Image: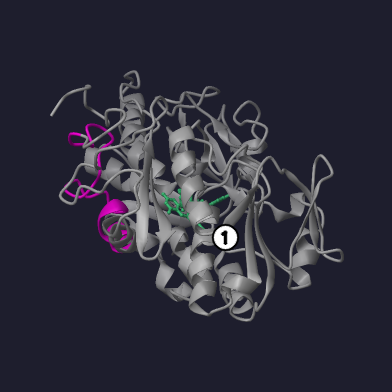
Amino acid sequence: MLGGGTGGTIVANRMRRLAGPEELELVVVDRDDVHVYQPGLLYVAFSQMAPGALVRRRSRQLQPGIRFLTGEACAIDLSARLVHLGERGDALAYDALVIATGARLAPETTAGFAAGVAAGWVHTFYDPAGAESLAAALESFEAGRLVVDIVDEPIKGPVSPLEFCILADGFFRHRRRRSSVEITLVTPLGSAFNRPLAGAALAEVLAKHDVGVVAGFRTQAIDPEGRFLVSDDDRREPADLAVVVARQVGAAFVSGTEGLADPRGFVVVDIHTLQSQADPAVFAIGDAAALPTLKAGTVAHFAAGVVAENVVHFLRGEPPAARFDGHATYLVETGDRTALVVDFDYGTEHVGGRYRGPIGLPLLTPSRLAHLAKRMVPQLYWRALLPARHACALTPVALFRAPTGATRPGRGETPGSG
Ligand SMILES: Cc1cc2nc3c(=O)[nH]c(=O)nc-3n(C[C@H](O)[C@H](O)[C@H](O)COP(=O)(O)OP(=O)(O)OC[C@H]3O[C@@H](n4cnc5c(N)ncnc54)[C@H](O)[C@@H]3O)c2cc1C
């Protein structure tokens, strides 16, 4: 397993439950032993969480009998089934390989990004240091145009820039500065979010919070002297404070392995079996995989069982039988202590009705309950999702109970059922 973040940890723990140490030797490699709960970075930016509260040791999240190695994966030799680690090139042999190295922020691909950061004008909440420094910048931002810019798609946590705008509205209202602060989301997408039903619901929430949206703006460069963003079709967006989500790419060793990746370095896999199209011994999970769904922790969670099962099938010489449906769920902060649930898979957006489970959160409708659920996720993450505990794991099938006033049926239901 290359990568001991959300996806790598869950797959390793699932595999340990599927096959004991006598059948399977499991090794997880990561460049460090610091696991960050990334969705919490949003709250760090608003001084609602300390960065330290998001961090635990990676090795501690793994079940007994899983070996954890610290090292940077630098190259893969597919024919010899070897991963080269570190500058010295120590080689690690494998029978099956799961690539779980996520999405890397690549600010260096946008001209002016580093200079903007150095000038204290460009900020980010996508890494702990950036989120902490942004918190200070927001506290001292009295008036002007706050622009939240998504340089390019796809990005991990793709709804979090929208959530940032919505939380910024409450932040400045609370400090009685809202009338002096204009908040604008700048996105390369054609609208606020690229799923029609969820997009419409989120556009409504953004409008309610007086957040402007500039769509179809693919950031080409950042001009820290003029304090504006430049698009690839030469439009300009001025900002007094720029919160920029950098372009994201796959790990360098993935792009460097012939035939393995798409042009951005994400592993090309069969979207259902999650097996590489270049080599059947290679699988990918989470943000590292090129999939037509979200780069989100929930997607890694829902896909983990499929990867774990298919790796075990592969090692037993069987065809990969488990299939992933692209299931993505996202709890979205919608302000005033409410949140809404976005949910879809490769084929269907789910709307109306409720998310199945003991609480039954309403879909696409802001509710207090969903906000409480969102705030409980960190505990669920460390205690149930990462350890892949069966009792608490959400499964990607039959998640909904009968819709109430649904315009379309929920997952696992037929029209008129229930
Ligand atoms: C601000 C923010 C908010 C978010 N909000 C949400 C949310 O509300 N809901 C949601 O579902 N998702 C959210 N996400 C997305 C979620 O955090 C990611 O989708 C999830 O962590 C992906 O898991 P992963 O295992 O693919 O990648 P990661 O968890 O990023 O793990 C990748 C690992 O690979 C390691 N690695 C990379 N390259 C190498 C290498 N060459 N050698 C060795 N190790 C390497 C890294 O150190 C890292 O540990 C958010 C993300 C951010 C940044």
What span is in magenta? 377-402
Please indicate whether residue 68 sits to the left or right of residue 268 in the image.
left
> Residue 294 versus residue 177: which sits nearer the camera?
177
How many labels sit on residues? 1
Instruction: Name which residue lies at 52% across and 66% down.
Output: 169
Instruction: Look at the picture and state if 394 lies above or below 161.
Output: above
Furthest residue toward right: 225
Instruction: Look at the picture and state if 151 lies above or below 413.
Output: below
Residue 293 image point, x, y percent: 47, 34
Q: What is the quadrant of residue 342 in the picture?
A: top left
- The answer to whether one can see residue 99 in this image is no
Residue 41 image point, x, y percent: 49, 65
Q: Which residue is mark 1?
A: 126
Instruction: Name which residue lies at 80% across and 41% down.
Output: 232
- The answer to whether one can see residue 372 in this image is yes
Furthest residue toward top: 319
Instruction: Look at the picture and state if 373 lies above or below 292.
Output: below
Instruction: Look at the picture and state if 15 lies above or below 129.
Output: above
What residue type is disc 1 on? Tyr
Quarter of the image with the N terminus is top left
> Residue 172 versus residue 305: which sits nearer the camera?
172
Residue 395 image point, x, y percent: 25, 38
Residue 314 image point, x, y percent: 36, 25
Please indicate whether residue 402 sits to the left or right of residue 406 in the image.
left
Q: Is mark 1 within 8 Å of ligand 1?
A: yes
Callout 1: few (<14), some (14-19), or many (20+) C-alpha neighbours within 10 Å? many
> Residue 83 versus residue 324: which sits nearer the camera?
324
Quarter of the image with the C terminus is top left
Q: How is the rendered protein coloured? A: one colour
Instruction: Name which residue lies at 40% across and 73% down.
Output: 53
> Circle 1 — which element?
loop
